[in-house]
Amino acid sequence: MKRNYADSPKIPKYRALRGRLPEGQFGCRITSGTLRYAAVFVIGIALLAALPLASAGTTKTESAQTSGRLFVCNTLSDTVSVIDDASGQVIATIPVGHRPIRIVASKDRQKVFTSNWLGASISVIDTVNLVVSETIPVTVKPQETEVTPDGTRLFVVHHPEQVVSVIDIATNTVIQVVPIGVPPAGGKTATDIAFTPNGRYALVPNYAKNVLDCIDTRTYAVTDIPTGLQPRRVAVMPMGTGHRAFVANFVSDSVTAVDTRSLAVVGTVPAGDEARGIAVNPQGNQVGVTNVFGGSITFFDPNTLTEQSTVQVGHKPWNLIYNRDGSKVIVSNSGNDTITVIDTATRKVIKTVDCHNGPFFSVFNDDETKLYVSCAGPLNPPFNPGFVDIVDTATYNVIGSTEIQLQPFDETFVNPF
């Protein structure tokens, strides 16, 4: 059954932990192609012949070696589903810790890490053998994670403990716990993390304190930079394009621009109602920010900080991603079960794609011939298995849907071979 957000108040009531995603789907405001077509052809022939997708004598592992793998956290099932890029089928379901909520790949793509929100742990998954190779205990409520640009450490943001754990990836041990503030009243927390391209600073929007916490990755000293109210997400200009980070302020309906060398605010850009998801295009000349209750995307120039346009999309756009050449941006509209495809040159909607219930995260495969959309399903009982919708990026049509487990949420794509 589809969710209906039409009658939802401005301050959502999704506060209980059980059965809900901790930050994504109840982000509350605290105020008052050849290979692609060949794959489809093979699937069709296999179905007609009532044969398995893999040819006789070919194991799943051998088949997967020719393509990548999508790893998806199933939050309410305490598992990670692994989908083979060539076939679109689940090739493994891996038990992890309690309530896996975020997932990130190591730089060598040999591991993925899930933060187990209610398990106070990080599960380390071997991306070749598809098993948990290590479980790392951490402090409570780990959520957002990111790997340092040099690939040596994993930084983990904890909700709402106001600390960041630092894990040595070679040894799978916690080597530092960085305080970023005193735990405030329930519901307030820090969220999201990104690194400057040179790896000098880890940037953590902290909506308990209305600052961007800048953690020096050499000394672990913390510098607070003031932002708007409830900074929720951060995006950084790519290497060689500039030295700025951009913080989406959920309550202030704005974006704070920060110089990542001087650690100073350089300006504020107005956005729409409840600015949240934010991304810089790979060329470093455009920023997009989702306006959750405004149902729109604000685009602006990251150098001049001038607005380019505001584009209406679907209901409750939470996240957005750019493709590699920056020609398109994909927006996940969890309120009306669609994704919106926007041409970034004209800033016009070129396609609205119907998805399963609750699309939240999207990720491309390695050659960007496919887009994978995780659809979490209903927020309230009875819970149904969620889906990953597979979108052909030549046409932006859904070419397949893979049913997995309960509340698929964050996802990452790797090719470990």
Image: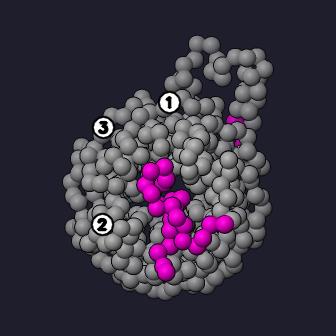
Taking the view exactly as shown, the residue that stands out farthest to the bottom is 267
Distance from disc 1 to disc 2, alpha carbons, whole Å, reads 35 Å
Residue 103, given in percent of the width and then of the height, sits at: 44, 48
Magenta-colored span: 7-36
Which numbered mark, 1 or 2, is in the foreground of this view?
2
Measured as percent of width and height from the top left, residue 178 is found at: 24, 64
Which residue type does callout 3 highlight? Glu
Q: Residue at x 43, y 55 (%)?
A: 17
Q: Nearer the viewer, mark 3 or mark 2?
A: 2
Give yes or no for residue 14 being in the magenta stretch: yes
- Reading the chain from its start, which is encountered first: label 1 or label 2? 1
Label 1: which residue?
Answer: 92
Mark 2: amino acid: Gln
Q: Secondary structure at mark 2?
A: loop
> What residue is shown with label 2?
162
Secondary structure mostly seen in magenta is loop
Residue at (23, 51) in percent of width and height? 174
Residue drawn at x 68%, y 54% is: 337
**Front in this rendered view, residue 205 or 171:** 205
Determine contact: label 3, label 1, CB under 8 Å. Answer: no
